[in-house]
Image (tube, helix red, strand yellow):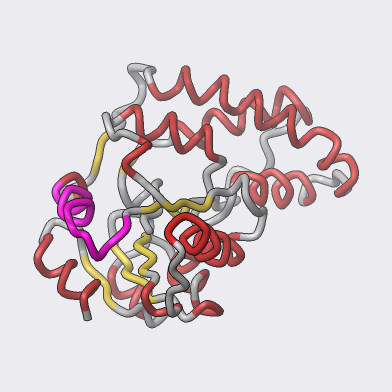
């Protein structure tokens, strides 16, 4: 299960720019510019950043749908803006192809993006969303740590298979990706293509950590371990 931002691709800030515009339009403020979006769900970002500026949970809940609607409108514009260089990271396409060809692996997404935002970002780098068969999104639950369980249930419902937790592999670029599947027993593969270095990621004890996902054979060996 792949994270998107910082793992599959870089949108060079398109998502943050679009969400900040939506927050300003809806709440009158973009929130603290030092607030980190990494490893959080879209709804969590809205709630935490707006709570920090003084809005109540009730006020945030009332406007959540509107701010996300405005975010998606802005994201469509940002992803095609000449200010952005949206690109897949080294080795991602080859790794996705390799996983997809295996009859003992199922390709999926585990991301804090709401589902329509995930579709837009993957489309911006030419990845077909429908290749990912079992997914969990920030629109499924506001708490990132709940998403592996969502994916686990969907795997069971789609394929009639109840996996052991360790059979779920979460691939991501933040400590949140490493920790989110722990309650389920999932294994985490960390990659230093986002904000965090390999050493910083290893402090959180992932199953494995890589500078990039460019060595397809090495990543598959970890998945098969």
Who's the residue at 56% across and 67% down the image?
Answer: 149
At which x and y percent is residue 182?
50, 78
Residue 102 in the magenta stretch? The answer is: yes
**Going by the image, does 139 lie left or right of 25?**
left
Q: What kind of secondary structure does the magenta stretch mostly adopt?
A: helix
Residue sitting nearer the eye, 151 or 87: 151
Residue sitting nearer the eye, 101 or 98: 101
Residue sitting nearer the eye, 172 or 1: 1
Q: Is residue 47 above or below residue 215?
A: above
Residue 77 in the magenta stretch? The answer is: no
**Going by the image, does 95 lie left or right of 197?**
left
Q: Which residues are magenta?
A: 94-106
**Going by the image, does 186 lie left or right of 99?**
right
Who's the residue at 32% across and 58% down the image?
Answer: 106
Quadrant of residue 210 within the rendered picture: bottom left
Q: Is residue 147 above or below residue 140?
A: below
Q: Is residue 88 above or below residue 37?
A: above
At which x and y percent is residue 90?
16, 48
At which x and y percent is residue 204?
42, 79
Who's the residue at 21% across and 64% down the image?
Answer: 211
Who's the residue at 28% across and 55% down the image?
Answer: 193
Report the quarter where the C terminus lies: bottom left
At which x and y percent is residue 50?
76, 44
Q: Is residue 94 above or below residue 222?
A: above
Quadrant of residue 124 within the rendered picture: top left
Quadrant of residue 178 within the rendered picture: bottom left
């Amino acid at each position: 299960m792949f994270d998107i931002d910082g793992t599959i691709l870089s949108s060079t800030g398109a998502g943050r720019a679009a969400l900040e515009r939506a927050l300003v339009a809806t709440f009158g403020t973009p929130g603290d510019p030092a607030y980190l979006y990494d490893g959080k769900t879209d709804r969590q970002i809205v709630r935490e950043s707006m709570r920090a500026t003084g809005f109540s949970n009730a006020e945030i809940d009332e406007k959540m749908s509107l701010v996300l609607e405005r975010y998606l409108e802005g994201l469509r514009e940002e992803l095609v803006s000449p200010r952005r260089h949206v690109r897949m990271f080294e080795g991602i396409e080859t790794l996705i192809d390799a996983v997809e060809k295996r009859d003992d692996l199922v390709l999926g997404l585990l991301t804090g993006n709401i589902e329509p935002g995930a579709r837009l970002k993957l489309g911006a780098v030419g990845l077909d969303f429908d290749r990912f068969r079992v997914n969990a999104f920030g629109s499924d639950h506001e708490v990132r740590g709940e998403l592996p369980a969502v994916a686990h249930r969907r795997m069971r419902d789609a394929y009639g298979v109840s996996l052991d937790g360790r059979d779920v592999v979460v691939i991501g670029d933040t400590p949140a990706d490493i920790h989110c599947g722990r309650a389920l027993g999932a294994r985490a593969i960390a990659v230093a293509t986002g904000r965090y270095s390999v050493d910083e990621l290893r402090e959180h004890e992932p199953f494995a950590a890589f500078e990039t996902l460019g060595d397809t054979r090495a990543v598959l060996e970890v998945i098969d371990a």
